[in-house]
Image (cartoon, coloured by chain):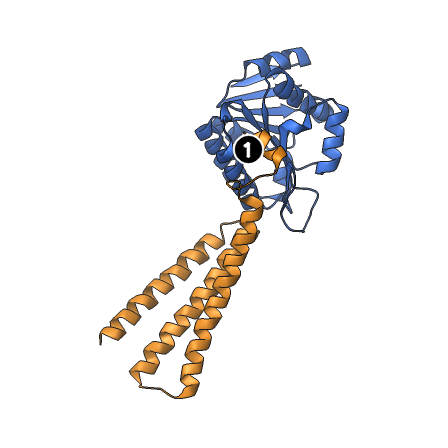
Amino acid sequence: MVTRVKSLKELENEIKKLKSNTLVVFVISGKKYHEVNIFILKKLIQLKKFSGIYISLNRPFKNLVKYLKEKKIDTDKIFFIDCVSSFFGEAKLAENCLFVPSPSRLTDIGIALDEAIRRMKNPSNKFLFLDSVSTLLIYNDLKVVAQFIHYLATKLRKFGVIGILMTVEKEIEERFLNFLIQISDKIIEVV
Amino acid sequence: MIDFLFLLAAMMLGFLTVFFLSLSNIKFTEGDLRKIIENFIYGTILVYGFLTSEFFFKLFSLNALQFVLIKYSLLIGSFYFYLLASYRIYEMSKVFGFAGKLPEKLRKILE
């Protein structure tokens, strides 16, 4: 199901309707990407009182935390998986961040997610925020990303966690978008 | 005779182990798991070498010191690679293992 939203108010209504055990793909126009990204995260934490995992493929942990704090988002509710900061280094676990050496190390990300989700006590009020599918496609083959997203979807459904997959409009080809439509419960297009 | 049968069976199992490990390794993205599998492959190849040498040394009754050295070097080599793999798993468990004690902040988020 593809829903088109044109304003943040409409987007808020869509977020309010989100139930646990759903996988939602947000297709966002490039110009609005950051604004919408922050808006969704804010609503998940403040409106729905969720906590969760944020996989960052675009911004390093420190920079992202600073940015989120500026936008008044409680970063203590988020476990970050940072695939940008320690390029070519070793994987490391800090206070609330796991540093993965590269966005192409999907096996490592998969293992970390599996462990984190299994450790969750109440998965129905948790989310997984992937920022973004478009960046994953820069570092990995389309087929590999599709397999990874499929693995994620199965895992999230099994444990009842809300999955939020962000992607930039026009950066993914139609074939991949069709795949996302197949595996997700909802596609929200923000124009 | 029974020795040879057991050795052949072990060699076959060793071959299958390397076969499945190699097949799975090419499917994983680069990272620690891949390195662990590589170590297991090398270790198992050396075990395979140990078994093969044992098989032929027995078959031709070769008991000289150099044959014993070859045989046990292969065995020690294999355990060296198993040790490397185990150490990598141990290191990996410190980063990716969430069942043990977690940093307080992370524990609160997940629980």
- Residue B33 image offset from top left, x and y in percent: 52, 52
Residue A131's spot in the image, x, y percent? 64, 32
Which of the 4 quarters of the picture holds residue B69? Answer: bottom left
Give percent across and percent down for residue B52.
36, 74
Mark yes or no: residue A174 visible: no
On screen, residue B39 versus residue A27, left or right, reads left
Residue designated by label 1: A176
Label 1: state its secondary structure: helix
Q: Amino acid at mark 1?
A: Phe
Q: Quadrant of the C terminus of chain B?
A: top right
At 57% across and 41% down in the image, what residue appears?
A109
Q: Is residue B20 left or right of residue B2?
A: right
In the image, farthest residue toward the left: B1
| On screen, residue A180 above or below A92 | above
Q: Is residue B105 visible?
A: yes
- Of B107 and B26, nearer the camera is B107
Figure check: B4 above or below A152: below
Say if A179 sits above or below B97 in the image. above
Q: Residue at the location (48% across, 71% down)?
A: B77
Q: Chain of mark 1?
A: A
For residue B35, what is the image quadrant?
Answer: bottom right
Q: Residues within 10 Å of mark 1 (few under 14, many from 20)?
A: some
User: For chain A, what colour was chosen?
Assistant: blue
| Chain that the image shows in orange | B
Residue in the image at 69% along x and 46% along y: A86
Q: Which is nearer the eye, B19 or B37?
A: B37
